Image (tube, rainbow, N blue to C red):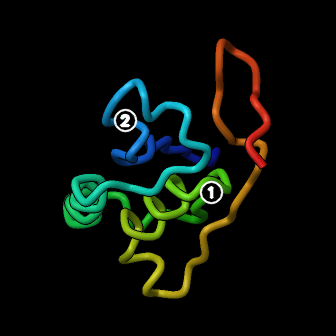
């Protein structure tokens, strides 16, 4: 059977609060962003079928993965930080590390 890939966008980061914040180099999640992750962790029906958790090495994506997939993390699954899945801008990969 072919693997199933679920793509999850990062939760709200400080760069999402205003256009002026878009220049922040590696913003953290806002308190609301953390709440979004915890709600996702409670509501997701897919935890039993997850075989890997991959995120870009940016702070907001790592924390989204850690908080949002907490049930799997608590059972020993790790987050794989993969630079190849960093920010996409205009269809090209922008270096993030």
Residue holding disc 2: 16
Q: Is residue 30 above or below residue 6?
A: below
Residue at image coords 60%, 69%: 79
Taking depth in this image into account, of 53 and 18 the one nearest to the observer is 18
Q: Nearer the viewer, residue 44 or 91?
A: 91
The answer to which of marks 1 and 2 sits earlier in the sequence is: 2
Residue at position x 31%, y 55% in the image? 30
Q: 47 or 20, which lies in front? A: 20
The residue depicted at 42 percent of the width and 28 percent of the height is 20
For residue 88, the mark is none
State left or right for residue 26 relative to residue 63. right
Q: Residue at x 43, y 86 (%)?
A: 74
Left or right: 38 as drawn, with respect to 1 = left
**Furthest residue in direction front, as rendered:** 20
Front-most of residues 45 and 7: 7
The tag on residue 54 is 1
Residue 91 position by quadrant: top right
* Closer to viewer: mark 1 or mark 2: 2
């Amino acid at each position: 059977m072919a693997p199933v890939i679920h793509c999850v966008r990062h939760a709200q980061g400080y760069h999402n609060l205003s256009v002026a914040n878009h220049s922040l180099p590696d913003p953290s999640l806002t308190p609301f962003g953390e709440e979004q992750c915890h709600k996702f962790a409670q509501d997701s029906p897919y935890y039993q079928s997850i075989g890997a958790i991959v995120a870009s090495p940016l702070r907001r994506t790592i924390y989204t993965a850690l908080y949002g997939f907490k049930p799997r993390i608590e059972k020993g699954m790790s987050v794989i930080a993969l630079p190849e899945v960093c920010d996409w801008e205009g269809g090209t990969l922008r270096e993030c590390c």
